[in-house]
Structures are given as structure tokens and as C-alpha cells.
Image (spheres, rainbow, N blue to C red):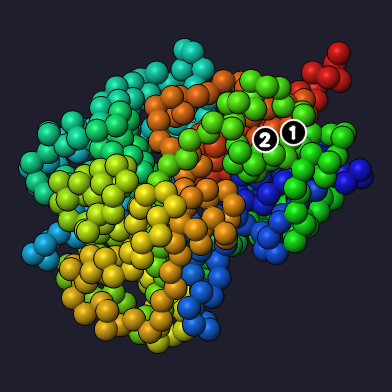
Amino acid sequence: MTRFDAVVVGSGPNGLAAAVELTRSGRQVLVVEKSNTIGGGTRTEALTLPGFLHDVCSAIHPLGVASPFFRSIGLGDWIQPEIPVSHPLDGERAGVLYRSLDETATGLGPDGDRYRRYVGSLVGHSDDLVAQVLGPVPFPPPHPVTLGRFGIPGLLPASVMVRALKTEQARGLLAGMAAHAIAPFTAPLTGALATLFSVLAHAHGWPLVRGGSQRIAEEMAALVEAGGGSVQTGRAITSESDLPTAGPVLLDVMPGAAVRLAGRRLDAATRRHLSGWKHGPGVFKVDWALDGPIPWADDASRRAGTVHVGGTFEEIAAAEHAVHVGDHPERPFVIVAQQSLFDPLRAPEDGQTAWAYCHVPARSDRDMTTLIEAQIERFAPGFRDRILARHVMSPSDYQAHNPNYVGGDIAGGAYSVRRLLRFGTSRPYRIGEGVYLCSSATPPGAGVHGMCGYYAARAAIADAGSSTAS
């Protein structure tokens, strides 16, 4: 390791983003990955049958295409589905989030004007909004009007915001968006997250990556190597003694693992804080190889990249509440992605793939396959008849695949307002002398956007500059 200027442990999107930013600053970086494949949450594998490619974790990337860092390096061969998101309801109805704000508002009927006023005021300022949501917010903020339009109503829980909506279509769309928080709908700021994902759909879309999410990792690894760095797989870092003593070390790991790896480089207060990190619920995922598209009863879902399956707002709120009190909902909220409808590289000519998961209590050992398929069958009669093969991943399978998914938690920690607002200059990233945390446990948190790695790298670069100046 001594010939490198910096070392990054972990090759997830944040670890690779940190490595790219350090490379752009003129440093030669070594990225060390325990797995035999880079990517962390951006891996793509043939999980079912030959020729069928499935995204193992992340699949659809609204935060990726909007990410200031990814945009600055020209990352991503994005494919935009015809419709970003649909939300099927009983009776062959659906709430539909189109790229067009006006088309979406028209489809929401009596709720259209309210949607247009609230979301429309933010779409035109989406870059300012994303920069503030995915970055430290200085005081005073540079775009206070945009932040106020977003943050003041968004402080409300989704359970309060829904009271202003009349139609099941609009209420369902709100529920599906809010459920990405992996939190009860009574939690503050769940309304803000729903708004953010709606704004992103209009301003940037909800795209997938041509050929699979693995391409995100491959493109960043290529930038590191082009800058004289190296990405080494199948190499485990297990303790402080495995780390270099000179140059910054950036850890794309969860806080508990950071304590084990950094050891005596952390002070007692930092060790206590990181050791007490609280993780959130897990996920149960199913991938299918199909002999044709999912036969959704409504037309929009047949043309959507993402389909939120769960029924009414009340049904989804009940399902998410059950998970957060340790129960398994009999009608879970299911997020479905249909990549092969838009990317022919994902499946043979006569086949399709489908990707789906639901939330479950952490470390759950219950097989949710039948319940997930029943929810899809409810809105797509005949779905089961199209299944050629399936691959399932429980929370423990996810943790085995990627140690950062502790107990199946793909969000890097439990949802909380304190965590969302924990921004400073370098404090969330610098955890010890020359040691930085760059995983999704740091701001701005979960999602494939690379900003956690970017900010950790900037903290390391700033510290090196201060050391040189002194």
C-alpha cells in the first residue's frame, strides 16, 4: 500500500466516488474490496437463468442521474423509461407519475391543481434543491426560497400531507414515494422525501443504467485506474494492522465495522458513538426470469420503469407500520422494477426480467415470496404463469452478499430526523486521525449518488491542505 497516496476500503458507489475525487485531486488511490466483484450495492448478476441479468440491489437511479458529483464526471449511460412511476389500484386504475408535470396533474383530477402548485414550484429549481438536499446546508442557505418551499411543507409526516388529497390515485402516489423513507408515515420529513422523488421524476426521470447497475461501479473504477490508481478485489481488511500508517484511509463500511478496522485511531467518544449505531428494517427481494412482460391490468404500469405495488394509502401505511413494530404485513408494499422492458441487454429476445422487494423486520427469516407474488398477481392477473425461474434474497442473504447491509438494512441506518440533519463541514466523515467514513451511514445517506464518498474525500483533501500549510 505504501506506493499509493490514499487507500479506500470498499468498492461500493461511495467508496469508488471517494477514490475518483481523490484521483481528480492528483492522488494515486488504492481501492481494496473483500468481494471478488466491485460495486457493493451496484452489482449485476445472472441470478436466475443464463442470459437474464438482474441488479442485485439498486436498480433505478433518480438520485444518480441528478447527483452533482456523478454529473461532474459524466457518469452513466442512462435509459429513461416512458413512464417513471406507476401505482396500480384495484379496478384497473392507477396513479401515474409522468415525466410531464402537466400530464401528471391532469391525471390526478381534483388533486391536479394542488400537485401542480406544490411540485411545479420546485421542478424549475430542481438543481438548487438537489444541491441542498444532497449537500451540507450552510446558514443562511444559498437558495432560501426553494428550500422553504420544499422544507416547510415537507416537515410534515406523510400521514398529515395526505389529508389534503381527495383521490386514491394521488394518495397512492404519495404513499409509494413516502415508503422509500423506510419509516412509518407518521415520521416527520416523510412528506419531504415523497416530494423530492416526485420532483426528480419530472426534472431528471427515474432511469436505469444500460447493461445493469454494475456499469456505475465499472465506470468509476476505470477513472481511478486511468489516474494511476488500482482497484483490487478478493482482498480483505480485517483490522487496524492491515491499514497503511501514512496517507488518508477512507472506509466505505458501516460504523460498527469502522470501529473494528480503525481500532486505536478512534477516540473513546467516537468509538461509543459508532458502536451504538442503530440499523433499520431489512428487505426481502425476489428476481424473476419471465417468458413475457408482467401483465398489469392497467396500461400505464405496462410502460413504467418502476411500479409501486400495495394498493391504497391506508394499506401501504399499515404495511410499513407493521414492519416498524416488528411484524410481517400480509399485504406488503412492494417496489417492482422492469428494466428489461427498456434495456434489451437484460434478457433474451423472448424473455423479460423483473425485480422486486418489500420491507421486513431486521434479520427476518420469513420467506415473503408468496406474499410478494400475491400482491403483484392482484394487479397483474396471470403474472405467476409467466415465471420461468426466481431467485430470492432474505435479509441474511443480503448481509452475506454485502456486509454493509447489516440485518438486511439497505439504507445504512435507521431513519431519523437527527440523522437526516447531521451535516457539518467534515465532522460526519473524519472519525480519527487520517481515517474517514464514507459509507451511506454519513450524510446525505442512502441512495446511489456518490455524495457521501465525495464529501469524505473533500474532507481528507482539506485536512491534507491544512497539514501542508502548517
Image position, residue 121 (x, y; %): 28, 31
Image position, residue 419 (x, y; %): 46, 28
Q: Which residue is mark 2?
A: 259
Q: Residues within 10 Å of mark 1 (few under 14, many from 20)?
A: some
Residue, x 15% and y 46% (percent of image)? 314
Image position, residue 427 (x, y; %): 62, 22
Which residue reaches farthest right?
Answer: 3
Choose between 344 and 7: the one closer to the eye: 7
Whether residue 319 can be seen here: yes
Whether residue 202 can be seen here: no
* Mark 2 → mark 1, Cα distance in angstroms: 6 Å
Circle 1: element type: helix
Residue, x 53% and y 33% (percent of image)? 277
Q: Are circles 2 and 1 on residues that touch, CB within 8 Å? A: yes
Question: What is the quadrant of residue 44 in the picture?
Answer: bottom right
Q: Amino acid at mark 2?
A: Val
Choose between 8 and 401: the one closer to the eye: 401
Q: Which residue is mark 1?
A: 263
Q: Residues within 10 Å of mark 2 (few under 14, many from 20)?
A: many
Residue, x 49% and y 82% (percent of image)? 49
Taking the image as shown, residue 385 lies to the left or right of residue 36, namely left
Taking the image as shown, residue 19 lies to the left or right of residue 343, namely right
